Amino acid sequence: MPKQTTESKPAEMANGKKQSPPIFENLEENLKQIQSKLGNSPDLIIRNYESLDHESHAAAVYINGLIDMERVEDYITHALSFDSLQEKAESAATALERFSFAKGKALSIGKEKIVEDQNSLLEGLLSGDTMLLFQGLTKALSVSTSGGEGRAVTEATTQVNIRGPKDSFTESLSTNLSLVRKRIKNPNLWIETLTIGAVTKTDVSIVHIHGLANEAMLQEFRKKLSEIHVDSILESGYIEQLIEENKYSPFPTIFNTERPDSVAGNLLEGRIALFIDGTPFVLIAPATFFMFFHTVEDYYQRYDVSSLIRLLRFMCLIVSLFGPAIFVAALNFHQEMIPTPLLINLASQREGVPFPVVIEVLLLEVTFEIIREAGIRMPSPIGQTVSIIGGLVLGQAAVQAGIVSPAMVIVVSLTGISSFATPAFNMALSIRLLRFVITFVSAYMGLYGIAITGLILIAHLCSLRSLGVPYMSPVAPFAAGDQKDIFLRTPLHFMKIRRRLVNPKSSVPGTTAQIRKDNPHEN
């Protein structure tokens, strides 16, 4: 897979430093230039149109597969067909008048612009536009006809829910923006579009609600995007890695989702969303640690049920992060903490095991990770079979062979299952990585090592920022009024104040939600 994330070297791609050549008056010369620049590509379609004297006066140029063929046929039939010109023969005699006539017909398509240089012409073609060139004119008409084959809106696959909307984003930027527009019918939903990637020319859109999003955060976000100078942006993960403030932290500081309702909810909290063409995953900033353990379904269920499930997720976080480490520390250094009958059982189970406890844990953990990765990469029916049968067969065989103890299989299995309770996949990956580190430390320092590592992790989390917002907010720094939706979820009629750390003085005309004032202790 391509991994081009280096700065573009050619002078002609360095932010327009080399001036683009103009469009020629000679139509044939323009068409030859386009064919030459695109390497005589077979998907480049050129349709010539003749005037009443049987001379080529115009040409429609587009790339097959990037355009909506029905829109192109409908537009060209009305704008450049022989019948239309014959009807308008008197008013469409000159090239300029023909150009104006075609431009007027473009109103039926919706979006058109005038192009006066060859680079802009090529960029329009590669974006799915249809270019109209005329004999004797040094400008072309670009008509938006992008379309082609695309995936339909389907149910989310990575963030599954029981109750709530079933639609998810697709690889089409326009489709994704419309899914959010349908949920937030407000003129203050502003969209800014820019292009990133010197070679791929990827379209990205910054979406926020004017009046709710913090202006300083918006400026910082725009600055980070403007500082990206790479050849290619093939997925939102490229931008996520390039704009993170702490690039060496194992914890993600940018949230990503494929659910439109999740994006809409975060926009209403004053956050900023970044849509990238070609990927169904949308980036959201600023992100906090607790966002990765919340789901949109928490707000579709009753508050008591949602609170219980949230507490369960945080409990699973502790188990998946410290479970094997505590077991190793207890067996190696702190046997007095284990009840005597249980200690005797554990000792008898390990009687024939040839490896130390830490090697036993790592052996099972690595095996579990291999099975999990194989289950993800293989086709769905086969992957599920590999995950279930592989875990059962290997676990049972390892116990019978005396390689591992039954108690260790239980601990590692419980740890692996607990990691699946984390809603955000990238956060679950970070926890899996840190679990190995903490297990190593516990094997040499026991519970003291676990305590020291835990304190280091907490200090590191408190030092992180996402667009200037503390990563552990609103717990550190503590905001009493924002505790209603962190570990527990209070009833909706109590949550009428937006979080202060996202935007302390935001307001949108016509909204009913109260906005926190300058007093940080106001509830």
Image (cartoon, rainbow, N blue to C red):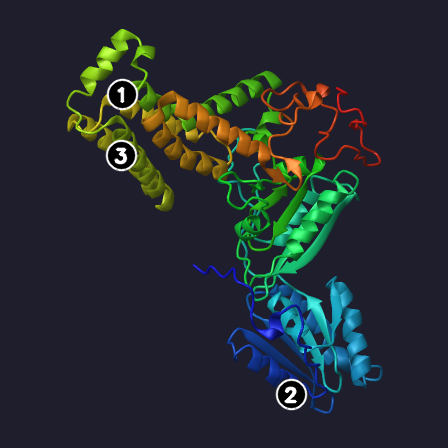
Q: Report whether residue 25 is seen.
A: yes
- Could you say which is closer to the camera, residue 202 or residue 93? 202
Residue 497 drawn above or below residue 87: above
Residue 111, image x, y percentages: 74, 63
Residue topped by disc 3: 363
Name the outermost residue toward the top. 340
Which quarter of the rendering shows the C terminus? top right
Q: Is mark 2 on a helix, strand or loop?
A: helix
Q: Earlier in the sequence, mark 2 or mark 1?
A: 2
Q: Which amino acid lies under the numbered mark 1 shown in the image of this protein?
A: Ala
Residue 342, image x, y percentages: 27, 11
Whole-number angstrom distance, CA of label 2 to CA of label 1 = 78 Å
Q: Earlier in the sequence, mark 3 or mark 1?
A: 3
Residue topped by disc 1: 407
Q: Which amino acid lies under the numbered mark 3 shown in the image of this protein?
A: Leu
The crowd level at tag 3 (other Cα within 10 Å; few <14, some 14-19, many 20+) is some
Residue 42, image x, y percentages: 50, 76
What residue do we see at 53% from left, 73% from top? 43
Residue topped by disc 2: 29
Q: Which amino acid lies under the numbered mark 2 shown in the image of this protein?
A: Glu
For residue 340, side relative to residue 176 (left or right): left
The answer to which image quadrant residue 124 occupies is bottom right
- Could you say which is closer to the camera, residue 343 or residue 147? 343
